[in-house]
Amino acid sequence: MPIRLNNTRFFGKFAKSYLCIMETKRQNKISRLIQKEVAEIFLYEGRNLFEGAMITVTRVHVTKDLSIARIYVSLFAIKDKNELLGKICLQSREIRKRLAVRIKNQVRIMPELEFFLDDSLDYIEKIEELLKK
């Protein structure tokens, strides 16, 4: 379905990239900060919580009011990615607490964390595999 912005149509992936440009500097700053700190939490403390799975934070989008952070993660060295994503979602309160300790002086309100599976790397691998055939 096309998205209309100022009498111009944008389709699919282009609409997403255009909407990302519309984020404010504050949103971008908070997004980068959260991405860096959550990645470090997964790196150093995630070994105990998630059975040694490799978790990469690919991107973070923060809502305009800075109340919700949507975190996209790629999961490696695990068989059932959806199960691990469920475990991450169950631990989101603990991750949020650890994040709050790290960034308490840079944000007024700690955003709620929502985790999503980023399967773009799997999609790229599948396309490369098909191109090799």
Image (cartoon, rainbow, N blue to C red):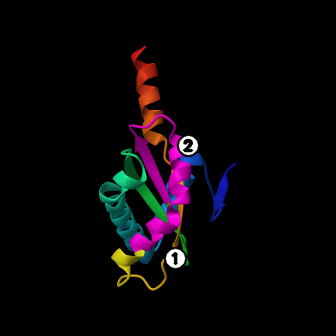
- Asked which quadrant contains residue 7, the reply is bottom right
Local packing at callout 2 (Cα closer than 10 Å; few below 14, some 14-19, many 20+) is few
Count of numbered marks: 2
Say which residue appears at 56% left-offset and 50% top-offset.
86
Q: Quick one: label 2 or label 1, which is nearer the N terminus?
A: 1
Looking at the image, is mark 2 or mark 1 nearer the viewer?
2
Number of the label disc, if any, that sits on residue 82: 2
Q: Is the residue 30 above or below the residue 104 in the image? A: above
- Whether tag 2 and tag 1 are in contact, CB under 8 A, the answer is no
Residue under label 1: 66
Q: Is mark 1 on a helix, strand or loop?
A: loop
What type is the residue that disc 1 sits on? Answer: Leu
The spot of residue 26 in percent (x, y) is: 42, 77
The percent coordinates of residue 50 (x first, y second) are: 42, 50
Residue 94 versus residue 110: which sits nearer the camera? 94
Q: Is residue 10 above or below residue 21?
A: above
